[in-house]
Image (cartoon, rainbow, N blue to C red):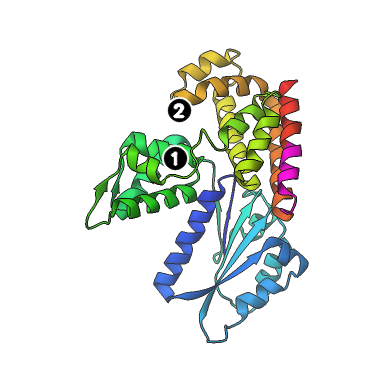
Amino acid sequence: MFYFCGPDESGASDAAAKIAALLAATFGEAEKVDLSGSELKRDPVRLADEARSVSLFGDKRIIHVRATGDDAHDAVEALLESPVGGWPVIIVATSATDKSRIAKLLDNRDDAMVGMFYLPDLRSVAGTVRSMGDAVGVRLSDDLAERIARSTALDTRMARSEIEKLALFLDASPQAPRQADAAALDAICAVSEDDGMMPLVNAVLGGDLRKIPSELSRMREQGINPVGLVLALERRTAQLVQLAARMGERGDVSSFIEQDKSVFFRDKPDLKQQLKRWRGPRLTRLCERLMMLHRTLIEDNRNGELVVAQGLAEIARAAAR
């Protein structure tokens, strides 16, 4: 059993995909069985049943579970208590950590692995983007790799999609690599960061109440995904947590941000405002509020736009105080 958790959902999902690929390379192709944590919460014995059952054609199976928090705890416990070995189970748990109840169940077991994924910084994701490009024959400069990392909000799944589109556009392959440039990226890229989520993220965390109504209207007009928007907020909040930890008791936020080499120069004005508003207990409460909002959206996305609009308005009002 593989249990991947932490605030970097894209990193956890990438790890799950790599494990599935390694299992397929070792044991042959397998049927993928998708389950959700909410399904397993309603029917805890289903995970054990699926992990022990054989498909109609006798194929091997890999069980993939997308969970939220500890909603799959009882199902995992039931599987572990089963005396019969089963197919591999890969769990990606959002809003969970390596201190969760499931992680504790799997601790110190020879047949289980727990991985905690922290949010990466711009530099590390840019390096990952360049490696993705090299794998498919797309050569990227440092500036272009950073642009892709920023425009996808440090989400490696979205970045991989952009790289794949670049490879098709340039007719690139490992055998015939091509150099990518800004013009090629402009031709294929998805909605840019400036036209996407970051203006709303910055307005909310900066407490700019005048911009909130127009930004929420733009969210609806452009069909911005509510879960993706909350993920972007969580990434920026995680960056604030890291900056606050490095800053410590120093009081001059502007000077600290200017001297911090990990901060992209275009983000510095927004981060100065946001770090002044969100520090200490307020920053802790912000993390908790975003986690609750994320969990609500995952459990019931039918009213996603309304739920996220209300949640962001509350956070913006708190930032403005």
Q: Which mark is residue 262?
A: 2
User: How far across and down, in percent of the image, does residue 250 sit?
Assistant: 58, 15
Q: Main secondary structure of the magenta part?
A: helix
**Which image quadrant: the C terminus?**
top right
Q: Which residues are magenta?
A: 301-311
Q: Residue furthest bottom?
A: 57
Q: Name the residue type under label 1.
A: Ala
Q: Quadrant of residue 238?
A: top right
Taking depth in this image into account, of 308 and 70 the one nearest to the observer is 308
Q: Which residue is mark 1?
A: 149
Determine the CA span between mark 2 and mark 1: 14 Å
Against 222, residue 52 (above or below) is: below
Q: Residue furthest front?
A: 221
Category of crowding for the residue at label 1, using alpha-carbon neighbours closer than 10 angstroms: few (below 14), some (14–19), many (at least 20): many
User: How far across and down, in percent of the image, does residue 47 sit?
Assistant: 67, 71
**Residue at x 30%, y 38% (from the top left corner):** 141
Against 161, residue 79 (above or below) is: below
Q: Is residue 109 left or right of residue 152?
A: right
**Residue at x 55%, y 26% (from the top left corner):** 243
* Residue 285 is at least partly visible in this image: no
Taking depth in this image into account, of 14 and 70 the one nearest to the observer is 14
Category of crowding for the residue at label 2, using alpha-carbon neighbours closer than 10 angstroms: few (below 14), some (14–19), many (at least 20): few
User: How far across and down, in percent of the image, does residue 67 sit?
Assistant: 66, 58
Residue 126 painted magenta:
no
* Residue 258 is at least partly visible in this image: yes
